[in-house]
């Protein structure tokens, strides 16, 4: 699957998980979002940004890829190291082991906080793990020591930069500006986090899982059980070279079939984000 398709799927998956909206078109009510994990209107928007970025993360195993060029030079260094460690494209980072490691990294980054002095405190600041309480209850925040979450901050800026680079088609010569965009949007996410303390881990894990599913539906498939290579009595349509699992209904990456699927997925994500923005602004729109 192509980068923009992965990012759209990540945003759509977040909308599906967290959206609680209904679009009324004449006599027909269309639900937007399953409301499995309600996170508030702002949280639908900020979480989708992180989930869209996380849906690009597995392709950091491709040093020449778009994602590797999203936040130079940091993303390039990470991509080179990831490619070496993962044994090549669509292997470790597209496997169940890789998914577990990314989720552990998200958990760790949510927990690794650094206390800061009073001078650096920002009472409305809230990061994953705080569940938004600091922003919602300033008095409670005032009684806590100031903290920052450096790993979560770096990871978020990287994820957002990936999403911006891919969705906004930022050319390489402007990629350094992604630092500014990533940090500004990162601050926006930090001050308007989804209203569920699990949100960061769920958004990162969901984004990666959606990426794996998207690639599994293409001709190349993914090394799901990396590092194992097991001979299984399966037809080569579904399992090749004792490693790559696939259900190639979309054909090659970037095919017409992929685009035919991605158009409604993108419209769904946009519908959810529009509903969230309208509700957040306190407006009601009837068509
Ligand atoms: Zn991939």
Image (tube, rainbow, N blue to C red):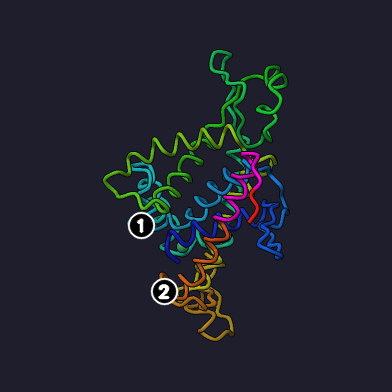
100 and 148: which is toward the camera: 148
- The quadrant the C terminus occupies is bottom right
User: Is the residue 48 above or below the residue 239 in the image?
Assistant: above
Locate residue 33: give its quadrant: bottom right
Local SS, label 1: loop
234 and 123: which is toward the camera: 123
Q: Position of residue 89 (x, y in %)?
A: 42, 63
- Which residue position is annotated with label 1? 65
- Which residue position is annotated with label 2? 255
Label 2 neighbourhood size at 10 Å, few (<14), some (14-19), many (20+)? few
Local SS, label 2: loop
* Magenta stretch holds residue 148: no
Q: Nearer the viewer, mark 2 or mark 1?
A: 2
67 and 183: which is toward the camera: 183
Range shown magenta: 270-284
Q: Position of residue 53 (x, y in %)?
A: 49, 50
- Sequence order check, earlier mark of 2 and 1: 1
Disc on res. 17? none
- Magenta part, dominant SS: helix
> Who's the residue at 41% across and 62% down the image?
88
């Amino acid at each position: 699957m192509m980068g923009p398709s992965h990012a759209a799927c990540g945003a759509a998956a977040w909308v599906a998980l967290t959206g609680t909206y209904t679009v009324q078109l004449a006599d027909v009510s269309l639900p937007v979002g399953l409301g499995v994990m309600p996170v508030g209107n702002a949280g639908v928007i900020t979480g989708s940004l992180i989930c869209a970025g996380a849906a690009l993360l597995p392709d950091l195993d491709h040093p020449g890829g778009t994602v590797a060029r999203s936040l130079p030079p940091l993303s390039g260094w990470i991509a080179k190291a990831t490619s070496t460690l993962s044994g090549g494209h669509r292997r470790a980072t597209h496997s169940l082991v890789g998914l577990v490691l990314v989720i552990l990294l998200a958990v760790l980054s949510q927990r690794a906080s650094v206390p800061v002095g009073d001078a650096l405190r920002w009472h409305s600041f809230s990061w994953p793990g705080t569940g938004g309480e600091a922003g919602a209850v300033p008095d409670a925040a005032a009684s806590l020591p100031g903290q920052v979450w450096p790993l979560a901050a770096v990871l978020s800026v990287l994820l957002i930069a990936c999403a911006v680079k891919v969705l906004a088609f930022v050319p390489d010569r402007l990629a350094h500006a992604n630092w500014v965009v990533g940090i500004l949007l990162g601050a926006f996410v930090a001050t308007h986090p989804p209203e569920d303390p699990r949100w960061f881990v769920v958004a990162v894990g969901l984004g990666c899982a959606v990426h794996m599913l998207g690639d599994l539906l293409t001709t190349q498939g993914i090394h799901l059980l990396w590092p194992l290579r097991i001979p299984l009595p399966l037809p080569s349509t579904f399992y090749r070279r004792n490693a790559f699992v696939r259900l190639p209904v979309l054909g090659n990456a970037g095919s017409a079939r992929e685009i035919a699927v991605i158009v409604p997925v993108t419209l769904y994500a946009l519908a959810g984000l529009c509903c969230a923005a309208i509700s957040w602004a306190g407006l009601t729109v009837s068509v």
